[in-house]
Image: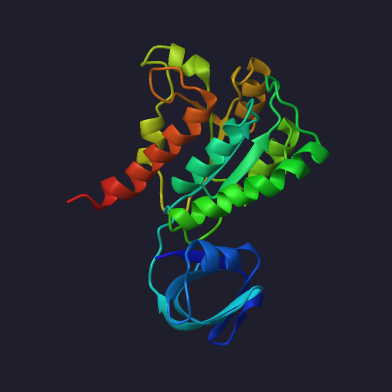
C-alpha cells in the first residue's frame, strides 16, 4: 500500500489534508479515488491507515481509520558523513542509504573531494536531493524521512560529532593493513546497544587524508576497515549500513 509523509500541520482531528506533489501522485500516478486506502506517516514517525474521502486538483482529504503499531527503523540511529563525490554518486548514496535505514546524511567537504559545493551550489541541488530521499522513504516504507544536513567542512563535522555515542571513519589504510592490526568493524557492531547514535565518516574517491584521520582520532573517532577489499566511495556507506542492519536486526531475531 502506498504511503505518504505529512506534517503535523496537515492533521486536523481524525482528518488529514494532503497537498503539493503528493496530490498528483495519488490522483494521476496511482489513480486512486474516494474510498481507496493509503498510509500516512507523520513527522513524529507514526503511521496511520487512512481512507480517501474527497479529492480535487489541489488537495486530497483523507480520514484516519486506525493508527498502526509498526516501525521499520533501525534500532540504532546512523548518520552518514559522506565525502562529496564526483558526478551523481551522492544521489545514489542518498537513495540506497535511505532504503538501508540511514537517519541523516551529511555532505562532507573533504580535503580530497574533487567536487566543490559552496552554499549556493548545494542550495540548487538540495531540492532534488530531498525529493530522492522522500521517494526512497516512501518506497521502502520508512517511518521517518532521513535528514539532509548542509555541507560541512571538517571543523563543523568534528563539532557535530560531540552529540554521538559511537564515532567511526572508514580508513583505506586499515583495509590495506593486516587483519591483526586493523580495527574490527565486527567488534564495534557486536557491542552496539539499542538507541546508540552512530556517526560514520566516508571519504571521497581519494579517501580520508592522513591529516583528516589524525583530527578525527583526536575527537574520539575510531578508524575501521570495511572488509579486506578497497570499496568505492559510493559502496562504503551501503556496506556499513547493511552490516549494521544485519547485526542489530537479523542476528537479534534469528531463530
For residue 240, side relative to residue 80 (left or right): left
| Residue 148 seen by the camera | no
**Visible residue check, residue 32:** yes
Residue at far right of view:
120
In this picture, is 172 found above or below 30?
above
Q: In the image, 5: left or right of 187? A: right
115 w.r.t. 29: above or below: above
Against 185, residue 149 (above or below) is below
Left or right, 209 with respect to 172, comes to: right
| Residue name at image x 70 percent, y 49 percent | 127
Question: Is 115 or 80 nearer to us in this picture?
Answer: 115
Counting from the top left corner in percent of width and height, residue 152 is at 72, 37
Q: Give the residue at the far bottom of this rendering.
A: 13
Quadrant of the frame with the N terminus: bottom left
How is the structure coloured here? rainbow
Residue at position x 39%, y 39% in the image: 242
Q: Quadrant of residue 17?
A: bottom right
Left or right: 159 as drawn, with respect to 131: right
Taking the spot 45% from the left edge, 47% from the top edge, the residue there is 99
Q: Toward the viewer: 205 or 181?
A: 205
Q: Position of residue 86 (x, y in %)?
A: 64, 25
**Nearest the eye: 148 or 81:** 148
Place of residue 151 in the rendered image (x, y in percent of width and height, measured from the top left): 72, 39
**Residue 228 image-quadrant placement:** top left
Residue 55 % position (x, y): 57, 79
Q: How many marks?
A: 0
Amino acid at each position: 500500500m502506498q504511503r505518504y509523509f505529512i506534517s503535523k500541520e496537515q492533521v486536523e482531528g481524525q482528518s488529514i489534508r494532503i497537498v503539493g506533489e503528493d496530490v498528483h501522485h495519488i490522483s494521476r500516478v496511482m489513480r486512486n479515488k474516494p474510498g481507496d486506502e493509503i498510509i500516512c506517516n507523520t513527522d513524529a514517525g507514526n503511521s496511520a491507515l487512512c481512507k480517501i474521502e474527497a479529492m480535487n486538483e489541489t488537495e486530497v482529504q483523507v480520514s484516519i481509520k486506525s493508527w498502526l503499531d509498526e516501525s521499520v527503523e533501525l534500532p540504532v540511529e546512523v548518520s552518514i558523513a559522506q565525502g562529496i563525490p564526483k558526478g551523481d554518486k551522492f544521489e545514489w548514496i542518498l537513495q540506497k542509504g535511505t532504503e538501508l535505514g540511514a537517519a541523516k546524511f551529511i555532505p562532507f567537504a573533504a580535503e580530497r573531494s574533487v567536487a566543490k559545493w559552496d552554499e549556493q551550489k548545494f542550495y540548487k541541488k538540495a531540492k532534488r536531493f530531498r525529493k530522492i530521499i522522500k521517494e526512497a522513504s516512501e518506497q521502502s516504507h520508512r517511518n521517518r524521512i532521513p535528514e539532509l544536513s548542509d555541507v560541512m567542512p571538517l571543523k563543523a563535522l568534528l563539532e557535530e560529532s560531540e552529540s554521538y555515542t559511537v564515532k567511526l571513519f572508514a580508513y583505506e589504510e586499515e583495509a590495506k593493513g593486516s587483519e591483526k592490526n586493523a580495527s574490527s568493524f565486527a567488534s564495534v557492531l557486536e557491542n552496539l546497544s539499542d538507541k546508540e547514535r552512530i556517526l560514520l565518516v566516508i571519504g571521497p574517491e581519494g579517501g580520508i587524508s592522513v591529516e583528516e584521520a589524525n583530527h578525527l582520532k583526536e575527537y574520539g573517532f575510531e578508524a575501521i576497515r570495511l572488509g579486506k577489499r578497497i570499496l568505492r566511495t559510493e559502496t562504503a556507506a551501503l556496506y556499513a549500513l547493511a552490516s549494521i542492519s544485519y547485526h542489530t536486526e537479523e542476528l537479534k531475531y534469528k531463530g
